[in-house]
Amino acid sequence: MRELREPYAVRLVRGDLTGVVPALLRLLLAPPSWVFAAAAEVRVALFRIGVFTSHRVPCPVVSVGNLTVGGTGKTPLVEWVVREIRLFGLNPVVLSRGYRAAPGETPDEIRTLAENLSSFRYVVDPDRVRGALTAIERHYAEALVLDDGFQHLRLARQLDLVTVDATAPFGGGHCLPRGMLREPVRGLRRAHAVILTRTDQVPPDRLVRIRNRLRRVAPRAVVCTSVHRPRGLHALGGEETEDLRWLEGRRVYLACAIGNPWSFETTVRRLGAVVAGCARLPDHHPFGEEETEAILAAAREAGAEAVITTQKDAARWNGKAAGGPPLYWLGIGLEILSGREELRGLIRSALKGGSKAG
């Protein structure tokens, strides 16, 4: 059975690989990383001075994004923002670029949101300006939530919310391809609020250091802390659910294709499960029949009583090998621990300001 794990390049730039060869490869990647960082900052500057145009639409726009590639918890925050906007009595529509989705295919994030939110409305379009106009005309959007929009500057927004994963906050300190940053950390100066995610998975002293750095980099931004709370264990492909206490003491095998698989593993362990192994595939990787059979075979060999995956990954599973252990996906929700009222105030101001601007 072939080993299922992330590509070498991902583990290299993230710093997982040690030794002379990985160190030399990272050294060779440094110059293109500097070019990437400079190009990202020039692009932002060109939008700021008006050489490139940010298009305004007659509707308030709230952007949810991040600074690094990989999973930082954007989708749970998008869900939280949609619920908050509804509390203010407006009809929100989510805009997605359709990252890694085939033409006509619904992106993983959108499928997850549709499962968790009733009467959910969305538009998938790589042209976010066109998508925004479609949302207003077709779905009568009264507010737009721009998913993964921090670096997408063509669509003007009233509010920029940025998620920073406390377990891997600053992308190794380097931009692509040397590190995991989409732009230099000082880009956070554009953020109105920074939402630290998974803060329960780092020591308190490290969390203090992260917050102090955020205050230095983005002194005007509201800094919130949050955690991802498990909220249900669901049978894959069925309606059966299990109480989270079902995991206590059970031997399980994990399978995921997300940006931060270690956070998922930590969450499952904290629920009392005994993790017998884990298949870590590249972010957004589809679970075809070959992967499914290999995972279930590994789970059987490890003596696992169940295979656990994430909600996003559950939508990409195809087929099930006969005689395999039962498959479940773990639901996760965002809980904001500090800065909640300040964040709600920013959203309220953005919705009022955007409505007036419209």
Image (cartoon, helix red, strand yellow):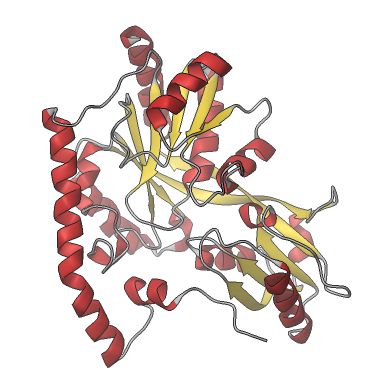
Residue 90 visible: no
Q: Residue at x 82, y 66 (%)?
A: 326
- Residue 102 as seen in the image, left or right of residue 301: left
Give the quadrant of the C terminus. top left
In this rendered view, identify the residue nearer to me: 123 or 243.
123
- View extreme (front): residue: 103
- Residue 234 as seen in the image, left or right of residue 147: right
Q: Reply above or below: 101 against 338.
A: below
- View extreme (left): residue: 49
Give the quadrant of the N terminus. bottom right
- View extreme (bottom): residue: 20
Q: Residue at x 61, y 39 (%)?
A: 113
Q: Residue at x 84, y 47 (%)?
A: 239
Quadrant in the picture for residue 295: bottom right
x and y percent of residue 247 in the render? 75, 65
x and y percent of residue 312 in the render? 62, 52
In this rendered view, identify the residue nearer to me: 271 or 130.
130
Quadrant in the picture for residue 303: bottom right
x and y percent of residue 294 in the render? 71, 78
